Image: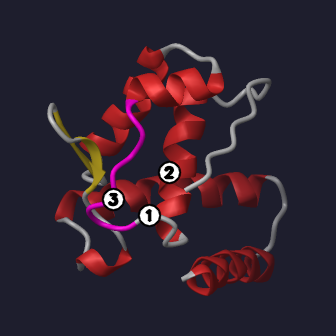
Amino acid sequence: MQLTLDLDSEVPIYQQIRDRIMEGIARRQAREGDPLPSTRQLAADFGINFHTVNKAYDLLRQQGVIRINRKSGAVIRRDAATGPPEAPFVDDWEERVRVLLAEATVQGMDRQDVLRRCEALLIGFEESA
Protein backbone atom coordinates (compact mmCIF):
# COMPACT_ATOMS: atom_id res chain seq x y z
CA MET A 1 0.00 0.00 0.00
CA GLN A 2 1.46 3.32 -1.10
CA LEU A 3 0.72 6.27 1.20
CA THR A 4 0.77 9.85 -0.03
CA LEU A 5 0.65 12.76 2.37
CA ASP A 6 0.38 16.50 1.82
CA LEU A 7 2.64 17.96 4.47
CA ASP A 8 1.36 21.47 3.63
CA SER A 9 -2.31 20.54 4.04
CA GLU A 10 -4.47 21.95 6.80
CA VAL A 11 -5.56 18.37 7.55
CA PRO A 12 -3.36 17.06 10.38
CA ILE A 13 -0.74 14.56 9.25
CA TYR A 14 -1.96 11.85 11.65
CA GLN A 15 -5.45 12.18 10.15
CA GLN A 16 -4.06 11.91 6.63
CA ILE A 17 -2.17 8.74 7.58
CA ARG A 18 -5.30 7.24 9.13
CA ASP A 19 -7.40 8.20 6.10
CA ARG A 20 -4.92 6.86 3.51
CA ILE A 21 -4.60 3.54 5.36
CA MET A 22 -8.40 3.26 5.58
CA GLU A 23 -8.71 3.99 1.85
CA GLY A 24 -5.96 1.47 1.05
CA ILE A 25 -7.83 -1.23 2.94
CA ALA A 26 -11.09 -0.27 1.21
CA ARG A 27 -9.34 -0.55 -2.16
CA ARG A 28 -7.99 -3.96 -1.07
CA GLN A 29 -4.38 -2.83 -1.30
CA ALA A 30 -4.05 -4.30 2.21
CA ARG A 31 -5.99 -7.15 3.74
CA GLU A 32 -6.63 -8.71 7.13
CA GLY A 33 -3.35 -9.99 8.53
CA ASP A 34 -1.11 -7.72 6.45
CA PRO A 35 1.51 -5.82 8.44
CA LEU A 36 1.84 -2.04 8.38
CA PRO A 37 5.24 -0.33 8.48
CA SER A 38 6.60 0.35 11.94
CA THR A 39 5.86 3.80 13.32
CA ARG A 40 9.56 4.67 13.20
CA GLN A 41 9.92 3.49 9.60
CA LEU A 42 6.85 5.38 8.38
CA ALA A 43 7.97 8.50 10.27
CA ALA A 44 11.44 8.25 8.70
CA ASP A 45 9.93 7.75 5.21
CA PHE A 46 8.00 11.04 5.52
CA GLY A 47 10.42 12.92 7.72
CA ILE A 48 7.86 13.34 10.50
CA ASN A 49 7.78 12.63 14.22
CA PHE A 50 7.03 8.98 15.05
CA HIS A 51 4.48 10.17 17.66
CA THR A 52 2.41 11.47 14.73
CA VAL A 53 2.33 7.98 13.23
CA ASN A 54 1.58 6.53 16.67
CA LYS A 55 -1.46 8.80 16.90
CA ALA A 56 -2.74 7.62 13.51
CA TYR A 57 -2.18 3.96 14.40
CA ASP A 58 -3.88 4.47 17.76
CA LEU A 59 -6.97 5.91 16.02
CA LEU A 60 -7.09 2.88 13.72
CA ARG A 61 -6.68 0.57 16.73
CA GLN A 62 -9.50 2.30 18.63
CA GLN A 63 -11.71 1.88 15.56
CA GLY A 64 -10.91 -1.84 15.43
CA VAL A 65 -9.19 -1.65 12.04
CA ILE A 66 -5.72 -2.69 13.17
CA ARG A 67 -4.22 -4.52 16.11
CA ILE A 68 -0.91 -3.60 17.62
CA ASN A 69 1.38 -6.22 19.10
CA ARG A 70 4.80 -5.52 20.58
CA LYS A 71 6.36 -8.38 18.62
CA SER A 72 4.55 -8.20 15.28
CA GLY A 73 3.80 -4.46 15.21
CA ALA A 74 0.69 -3.06 13.56
CA VAL A 75 -1.38 -5.54 11.55
CA ILE A 76 -4.63 -5.09 9.61
CA ARG A 77 -7.47 -6.52 11.72
CA ARG A 78 -10.50 -5.75 9.53
CA ASP A 79 -11.15 -5.52 5.83
CA ALA A 80 -14.23 -5.75 3.63
CA ALA A 81 -14.23 -9.56 3.88
CA THR A 82 -14.05 -9.65 7.68
CA GLY A 83 -17.81 -9.60 8.08
CA PRO A 84 -20.42 -7.18 9.37
CA PRO A 85 -19.26 -4.16 11.36
CA GLU A 86 -19.10 -4.21 15.12
CA ALA A 87 -22.07 -2.48 16.80
CA PRO A 88 -20.45 0.79 17.96
CA PHE A 89 -19.04 1.46 14.48
CA VAL A 90 -22.43 1.93 12.82
CA ASP A 91 -23.57 4.58 15.30
CA ASP A 92 -20.29 6.50 15.03
CA TRP A 93 -20.28 6.22 11.23
CA GLU A 94 -23.85 7.48 10.99
CA GLU A 95 -23.00 10.52 13.10
CA ARG A 96 -20.02 11.38 10.86
CA VAL A 97 -22.15 10.94 7.73
CA ARG A 98 -24.84 13.19 9.25
CA VAL A 99 -22.28 15.98 9.64
CA LEU A 100 -20.93 15.49 6.10
CA LEU A 101 -24.45 15.60 4.68
CA ALA A 102 -25.19 18.74 6.69
CA GLU A 103 -22.06 20.34 5.23
CA ALA A 104 -23.11 19.35 1.70
CA THR A 105 -26.59 20.78 2.28
CA VAL A 106 -25.23 24.05 3.67
CA GLN A 107 -22.94 24.36 0.62
CA GLY A 108 -25.91 23.91 -1.73
CA MET A 109 -25.33 20.37 -3.00
CA ASP A 110 -28.61 18.75 -3.96
CA ARG A 111 -29.71 15.22 -3.12
CA GLN A 112 -28.99 13.78 -6.57
CA ASP A 113 -25.49 15.22 -6.66
CA VAL A 114 -24.69 13.82 -3.20
CA LEU A 115 -26.05 10.39 -4.12
CA ARG A 116 -24.24 10.38 -7.48
CA ARG A 117 -20.92 11.26 -5.85
CA CYS A 118 -21.35 8.66 -3.08
CA GLU A 119 -22.18 6.00 -5.66
CA ALA A 120 -19.09 6.90 -7.72
CA LEU A 121 -16.85 6.65 -4.65
CA LEU A 122 -18.26 3.26 -3.66
CA ILE A 123 -17.84 1.97 -7.20
CA GLY A 124 -14.22 3.16 -7.09
CA PHE A 125 -13.57 1.00 -4.02
CA GLU A 126 -15.27 -2.00 -5.60
CA GLU A 127 -13.35 -1.65 -8.88
CA SER A 128 -10.06 -1.61 -7.00
CA ALA A 129 -10.75 -5.08 -5.67
For the residue marked with disc 2, what is the amino acid?
Ile
**What residue did someone put label 3 on?**
34
Q: Residue at x 62, y 46 (%)?
A: 3
**Quarter of the picture holding the C terminus:** bottom right
| Range of residues picked out in magenta | 31-38
Q: Residue at x 52, y 13 (%)?
A: 49
For the residue marked with disc 3, what is the amino acid?
Asp
Q: Secondary structure at mark 1?
A: loop
- Using the image as rendered, state which of residue 13 and residue 41 is in the foreground: 41
Q: Position of residue 35 (x, y in %)?
A: 33, 51
- Disc 3 versus disc 2: distance between alpha carbons? 12 Å
Crowding near the residue tagged with mark 1, few <14, some 14–19, many ≥20 C-alpha atoms within 10 Å = many
Q: Is residue 19 above or below residue 109?
A: above
By what rule are the colours in the image chosen? secondary structure
Crowding near the residue tagged with mark 3, few <14, some 14–19, many ≥20 C-alpha atoms within 10 Å = some
Outermost residue toward the right?
108
For the residue marked with disc 1, what is the amino acid?
Ala
Q: Secondary structure at mark 2?
A: helix
Contact (Cβ within 8 Å) of mark 1 with mark 3: yes
- All told, the count of numbered labels is 3
Is residue 79 toward the left or the right of residue 19 in the image? Answer: left
Q: Residue at x 28, y 64 (%)?
A: 78
Label for residue 30?
1
Contact (Cβ within 8 Å) of mark 2 with mark 1: yes
Q: Secondary structure at mark 3?
A: loop
Q: Is residue 99 magenta?
A: no
**What residue did someone put label 2 on?**
21
